[in-house]
Image (spheres, grey):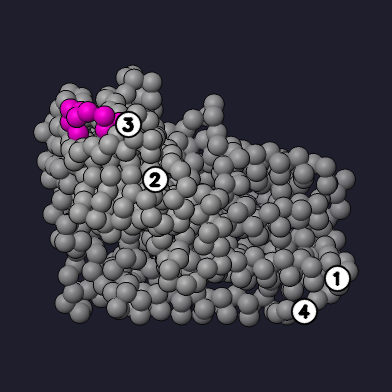
Amino acid sequence: METLYRYSKTMPFPTAKSKAKPGTGFRNSRITLWILAILLGVFFGYSRFFEGGGKGWKSVISSDGIGYYAYLPSLIIYADPSWEKFTAAERANYGRPDYNPQYLTNVNGKQVNKYFSGEAILLLPFFLTAIIFSWITGADINGLSFWFQLFTGLGSLFYLFCGLYFLKKILAWFRFSENATSITLAAVIAGTNLLYYAMSQPAMSHTFSFFAINSFLWLSIRFSENPARPYGTLCGLMLGLVILLRPTNLILVFALPLFLNRARLSAYIKNILNLKKPGFIAGLAAILLVQALLWRIQTGQWLIISYPDEGFYFSSPRIADFLFSFRRGWFIYTPLMLISLPGIFYLPGQKAGKLLLFLLFVSLLVYISSAWWCWYYGDGFGQRPLVDFYGIFMVLLAALLNGARSKPLFRFICTLTALCILLNIFQIWQYREKFISRDNMNASKYFYVFFRTADEYRDCLGGCAEEPFYKADLIRPMASFLNGFEKPQPHWINQDPWLAGSKAAAGKAVFLFRQDKEFGPGIEIPYDSLSKTPSMVFCEISLMLRDSIPAASNQAMLVITADSINRSYNYYNAFRLNDIPYWSTAGWRSLHFTLNLPKFTNRNARLKIYLWNPAKGVFMVDEMGISLYGKAAK
């Protein structure tokens, strides 16, 4: 039976007292915590008020973060559950009359915010403060002006600091050394992509989830030790917030056995299900009821599926890509997590049981996360769905540091941790400065810009390889086009052939980009001829390319446009043909691109896909193919 030791008069501690470990570092984890808080505040202030000509504050609420936040202005300022008034405010703020929020989806004919409301609940005090400051200063009370952006960012930093505080409490409960605790607190910020989301995208849900998960774990530990106090209700409230931030984070409950031994876990479960003392159930139900009420207000229904066009492929998870790909691989962009894993062998408790439970938790976490249809989760630095759980993995790093009994081993682990911190900070800088592609990295791109700082490597990567949207029909294309430039083809534009003889990739003709040709071949077609029903469109484009002179095609672009895709929104996207700058003229190369277009709801929309050669380099194109796919029939 596991031996219990006293951490205080009321708190039995789950492991033997540890001695101070060899090595150097901060001796007081409280000092470390405050230093981190100050540095985070300074870096946040710099990135928001000095970068972008002093306009960096305008992008605090951005990306997916606008969807999590939108509940507050829509319901409190505009009292409009249809979202139309706040959408109008967004259009005015961005200066884009054709803007349509990506966070809104259609459920039973109603506009619904697909994101859950947990972040909005946490930000409510900061939002109300922003209203007061806006009223005092005479600023616009539109939900997107300066004070709203500022206090949303400060709210994110506040909850990040609270998450670090609860992590420190958990590490102290394990009685890890001050060195191990201080290094771990510094590492979770500086050595992981949590730093990126705290500084660059603070309105995203990850810093809030980091707080909610760490606080739930700490409250669960306290509740398992003293069920008579109100920890049960607080546990229920925090678990509800965990769910309303990201529903898949409910997998957190499988990590509880790492913190509670069998006897305490059994008592914990009995206490939370005790109907005579329903604190936990009442707290959980109170939070979940908030989301049900919001759905009721928006749609008239208490329960809906707010992600009707997205989902999981549980039969084909992309586990290897999720962990190791150069596109967004967890261990590639956050190698500190790989270093932390051996810490499970040093975690106090029954070693075999802890290892099996940890493997179960990590397996479920990676399996569910990698089964999402877009396993790389769009734009972002590293694998962002795992950021929420970094408190758990940092307990393992602290256990590893705490268990290092010799100075050489301790220093070796510290050295690896320091290297991970340096790599993380540098690659975040590269990502922010457009050395690393936002969404389309691969091995050749990664090593081409690895540790590069010269301007010639900035924004030099091209290509596009998006996953097909959820349940795209890849068997029956809406339309397919192939042009070998031997003769004119219907729906093709700028297809003048050039007889190349033996230089052609196939046949006798190619399209030749000369110095007097800026726009090249492509298609232009009305959506009505592709489909009679609204649908997203997945594009697959291939071509053969050969440079006539070195680097001729390095500035060449593939352009995709759609006029009036939903009567008010015009779509435009363009990216370079070459993944990395290309310097050879030896033979033909095969290029392949895939990307998703937003849902077409206007049958009169016109889709255009074509090549653009703004630098007017001399190169040849042959065998250009375009296939378009819609959504599979139910």
Q: Label 4, on which residue?
A: 24
Q: Of helix, strand and loop, which one carries label 3? A: loop
Residue at horizontal 72 percent and vertical 63 percent from the top: 398
- Nearer the observer, 133 or 542: 542
**Residue 395's spot in the image, x, y percent?**
69, 58
> Separation of disc 3 and disc 4 at Cα?
72 Å
Label for residue 508? 3
Q: Which residue is mark 1?
A: 408
Tell me which label, 3 or 4, sits earlier in the chain. 4
- Check disc 2 and give the amino acid type: Arg
- Residue drawn 32% across the image and 38% down it: 500
Mark with earlier residue (2, 3): 3
Q: Nearer the viewer, residue 580 or 238?
A: 580
Q: Residues within 10 Å of mark 3 (few under 14, many from 20)?
A: some
Estimate the spatial distance between the alpha carbons at disc 1 and disc 4, rounded to whole Å. 12 Å
Main SS of the magenta part reads loop
Magenta part of the protein: which range?
484-492
